[in-house]
């Protein structure tokens, strides 16, 4: 997989997680996923998470056509899964812009989920929580 040139590359983000994805022409009849040099099932044991990540491939009808090589860092597993999904969507739209981009945009796969944890403010115990108020 490493010696074959990639079809498309893209970066995706969610929360504080960042992912880079490379699409490579598939070697077999089933697409292979490598995330940080490991198998997909190893890093993401939840079937629901793996289905969520593969959604762009299902939408575009390209399951089995590409091997996916991804690198993810930061955040947790859910954030990394969302970042990989975003990067995969961007890579697919880069590979065939006219056909895939409208489908992915309609399903909301190209939208970056910018929600992050709000920072703790000084003089209070949390981001929104205040210390207990007492009149006397």
Image (cartoon, rainbow, N blue to C red):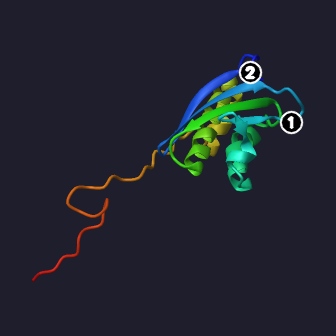
When the figure is inspected, residue 66 is found, relative to residue 126, above or below; the finding is: above
Write down the residue under mark 2.
Answer: 2
**Residue 130 location (% of width, % of height):** 25, 68
Residue plotted at (68% across, 30% down): 92
Residue 108 seen in the current view:
no
Write down the residue under mark 1.
Answer: 30
Q: Secondary structure at mark 1?
A: loop
Q: Nearer the viewer, mark 2 or mark 1?
A: 2
Mark 2 is surrounded, within 10 Å at the Cα level, by few (under 14), some (14 to 19) or many (20 or more) other residues, namely: few
The answer to which of 119 and 105 lies nearer the viewer is: 119
User: Residue 34 occupies which quadrant of the picture?
Assistant: top right
The answer to which of 14 and 103 lies nearer the viewer is: 14
- What's the mark number on residue 42? none
**Residue 31 location (% of width, % of height):** 81, 35
Assign the C terminus to one quadrant of the image. bottom left
The answer to which of 116 and 131 lies nearer the viewer is: 131
Assign the N terminus to one quadrant of the image. top right
136 displayed left or right of 67: left
When the figure is inspected, residue 68 is found, relative to residue 55, above or below; the finding is: above
Question: Outermost residue, bottom direction?
Answer: 136
Residue 37 seen in the current view:
yes
Residue contact between numbered discs 2 and 1, judged by CB atoms under 8 Å: no
Residue plotted at (75% across, 24% down): 24
User: Residue 5 occupies which quadrant of the picture?
Assistant: top right
When the figure is inspected, residue 23 is found, relative to residue 44, above or below; the finding is: above
Q: Secondary structure at mark 2?
A: loop
Q: Earlier in the sequence, mark 2 or mark 1?
A: 2
User: Residue 2 occupies which quadrant of the picture?
Assistant: top right
Residue plotted at (74% across, 38% down): 57
For the residues labelled 2 and 1, the Cα–Cα distance comes to 17 Å
111 displayed left or right of 125: right
């Amino acid at each position: 997989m490493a010696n074959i040139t990639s079809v498309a590359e893209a970066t995706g983000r969610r929360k504080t997680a960042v992912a880079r994805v490379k699409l490579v022409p598939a070697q077999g009849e089933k697409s292979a996923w490598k995330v940080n040099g490991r198998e997909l099932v190893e890093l993401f044991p939840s079937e629901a998470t793996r289905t969520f990540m593969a959604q762009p491939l299902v939408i575009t009808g390209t399951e089995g056509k590409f091997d996916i090589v991804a690198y993810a860092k930061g955040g947790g597993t859910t954030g990394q899964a969302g970042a990989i999904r975003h990067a995969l969507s961007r890579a697919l739209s880069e590979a065939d812009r006219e056909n895939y981009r409208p489908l992915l945009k309609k399903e909301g796969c190209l939208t970056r989920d910018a929600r992050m944890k709000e920072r703790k403010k000084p003089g209070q115990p949390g981001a929104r929580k205040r210390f207990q108020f007492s009149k006397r």
